[in-house]
Amino acid sequence: MIYRDHFQNYKGYAIPKAQLIIADIPYNLGNNAYASNPSWYKDGNNANGESALAGKSFFDTDDDFRPAEFMHFCSTMLKAETKTKKVEGEARQKGDAPCMIVFCAFDQQMYLIELAKRYGLNNYINLVFRKNFSAQVLKANMKVVGNCEYALILYRDKLPKFRNNGKMIFNCMDWPRDNVSEKIHPTQKPVELLKTLIEIFTDKGDVVIDPCAGSGSTLVAAERCGRKSYGFEIKKDFYNAAKKWIDEEKTTIQEIKELGFAKTELSKLNPTLF
Ligand SMILES: C[S@@+](CC[C@H](N)C(=O)[O-])C[C@H]1O[C@@H](n2cnc3c(N)ncnc32)[C@H](O)[C@@H]1O
């Protein structure tokens, strides 16, 4: 379920508390969103002079983003921690504490870690995602270019639910390219990456919330994993495209469950089949 509203208005909706909140907050790059990106120049060529994007932020909403209200939302909408029960025959107690994952710029990390503490999210684990490409192509032969994305796992006191089938999970992960999903948003996250994160920190039926949903990629990933998904997006065009994507995804999942195949998707490819 995605709402076209500010996440700050969450009280107006009956949203259950989340096992996992995934958010990709505006990077607050201010007037530098396109730095190192060829779009800074007309036709991507610095010989043509600066384009209309030079010195701009990605969206007008980026300038107005309020991190403290975001953290308040997350601390309120994350499930409470419960007492862990000792399961007979198991050496260790299995925790089911909730957590949030926030994608952020490298230099936002310390600020977010400190801000989270003010809202009871006292602990963190940092995540690094390694891409095999870089968007920083300008002067790429003259300096080291970035190929990593960053995120923080933030949690209160107990270690979050962890579904790893007994395997270790490294904090540096590969960033899978998403060549399948329609490109709706300039900072759209790959569905396969979101699915991996959702499967580590939740079980089927758990609630996943994305307060800054953009394309709806987190909600689509959550639906594919059999989790309940809720999100907010203020920009009309992103909201409309995200809603369409999520609705189509739900139809596909339902049809596969009932018929064993995705009838609507198949009939788009070949309308004469049905
Ligand atoms: C970095 S993008 C998220 C991209 C998303 N992770 C994806 O994969 O498509 C952040 C989004 O948050 C939205 N946004 C900013 N402030 C918001 C608010 N207060 N409530 C809801 N959405 C907000 C912006 O319009 C923008 O689309």
Image (cartoon, grey):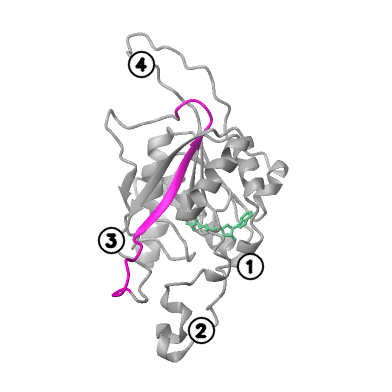
Query: Which is more N-terminal, label 4 or label 1?
Result: 1
Spatial separation of the CA atoms under disc 2 and disc 1: 17 Å
Q: Which residue is drawn at 69% across and 48% down?
A: 8
Look at mark 2 in the image and give the residue it sits on. Answer: 51
Spatial separation of the CA atoms under disc 1 and disc 3: 30 Å
Q: Which range is magenta?
A: 140-159
**Label 1 SS:** helix
What numbered label is drawn on residue 232?
none
Q: Does the residue labelled 4 lie within 8 Å of ligand 1?
A: no
Look at mark 3 in the image and give the residue it sits on. Answer: 132
Q: Is residue 156 left or right of residue 140?
A: right
Q: Nearer the viewer, mark 2 or mark 4?
A: 2
Looking at numbered disc 1 in the image, what kind of residue is underneath it?
A: Asp
**Label 4 SS:** loop
Residue 209 among those drawn in magenta: no
Look at mark 1 in the image and give the residue it sits on. Answer: 60
Looking at numbered disc 2 in the image, what kind of residue is underneath it?
A: Ser
Quadrant in the picture for residue 195: top left
**Pick the front one: 163 or 75:** 75
Query: Which is more N-terminal, label 3 or label 1?
Result: 1
Q: In this view, does 132 lie to the left or right of 37?
A: left
Quadrant in the picture for residue 161: top left
In percent of width and height, residue 194 lies at 41, 48
What numbered label is drawn on residue 92?
4
